[in-house]
Amino acid sequence: MTGFPRTLVGGVSLPRLLIGTNWFLGWSHTSLAKDKFIKEHQTCERIAEILGVFLEQGIDAVMGPPSPLLEAAVRDAEQRSGRSMTRILTPIFNTRPGGPPENEPEPVLDRTKALNATFCLPHMVVTDALVDRREGCIRDIERYTGMIRARGMIPGLSTHMPEAVVYADKTGADVETYIQLYNAAGFLMQVEADWVMRIIQNAKKPVMTIKPLAAGRLLPVVGLAFAWNTIREQDMVTIGTTTPDEAREVIDISLDLLSRRIPDNELQRTRSKLTLT
């Protein structure tokens, strides 16, 4: 297999493995202490080094919030490798009057565009606040997707609510893709994994799944085996890593799983396993 398998989203070629950023920017979903460790450890240079490992395998798309630190690291990695990266950004903005003026949709989307976003998927804080279960719709969605299109970005939705995918498909919302929680542990998911599996299978647009390792609660081979074997060929897996070695590991495991091979990555060694070798 040459390079990483790819898919097409809104007319843009993307790798099926996307680079997540929680382990770059400090959202561990574990503890405040772990968040602090990430923020103190990750520098622009270290993030760029990890991005470079992904770029070596043709994995050239990164997902995250509009972040000057992330953008600086992406530019650094691009310059080092001579390859460009696609930015999939997930901004948060006011959905009701009276919020901070700098957080109104227009200036937030302007800043998102200025950070070179190709895709703009309002974060679940926005999307899920607009999901109307009574009416079976996503309120004001066309207003926001229109703003995104007007700025030359491709709209999608980031959600933790499986209803968002169903309602967007049912109402023909102007989106090209969805970000959806999906992992074997059911971590942060609002319904059982088999329900979300079915929703992804029936989605009219490609789905970018997130948190395949349940924020470190699943071994890479376990979480990735579940994800790669239960999504469609047009769908994607987003994964965050803390070091270049972690990036190499998840890439190798993913390539083995996609080729229907048992992963042959080197296992961790502990004293309790001495009798197994």
Image (spheres, rainbow, N blue to C red):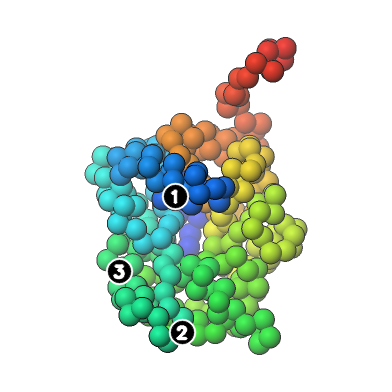
- The residue shown at (48%, 62%) is 9
User: Left or right of 36: which side holds 127?
Assistant: right
Which quarter of the rendering shows the C terminus? top right
- The residue shown at (46%, 81%) is 95
Q: Nearer the viewer, residue 56 or 11?
A: 56
Going from N to C along the chain, the mark reached first, 3 or 1, is 1
Q: Element at badge 2?
A: loop
Going from N to C along the chain, the mark reached first, 2 or 3, is 2
- Residue named by callout 1: 26
- Residue named by callout 3: 111
Which label belongs to residue 96? Answer: 2
Q: Amino acid at mark 1?
A: Gly
Q: Position of residue 188 (x, y in %)?
A: 64, 58
The single residue placed furthest to the left in the displayed view is 79
Residue at mark 2 to residue at mark 1: CA–CA distance: 28 Å
Vertical order, 79 against 9 (above or below): above
Q: Position of residue 134 (x, y in %)?
A: 68, 86
Q: Position of residue 73 (x, y in %)?
A: 31, 47
Q: Quadrant of residue 12?
A: bottom left
Q: Element at badge 3?
A: helix
Q: Amino acid at mark 3?
A: Arg
Q: Amino acid at mark 2?
A: Arg
Q: Nearer the viewer, residue 241 or 8?
A: 241
Mark 3 crowdedness (10 Å alpha carbons): few <14, some 14-19, many ≥20: some
Going from N to C along the chain, the mark reached first, 2 or 1, is 1
Q: Nearer the viewer, residue 8 or 166?
A: 166
Vertical order, 36 against 64 (above or below): above
User: Left or right of 271: which side holds 101?
Assistant: left
Residue at mark 3 to residue at mark 1: CA–CA distance: 21 Å
Residue 82 in sight:
no
- The residue shown at (50%, 55%) is 7
Which label belongs to residue 4? Answer: none
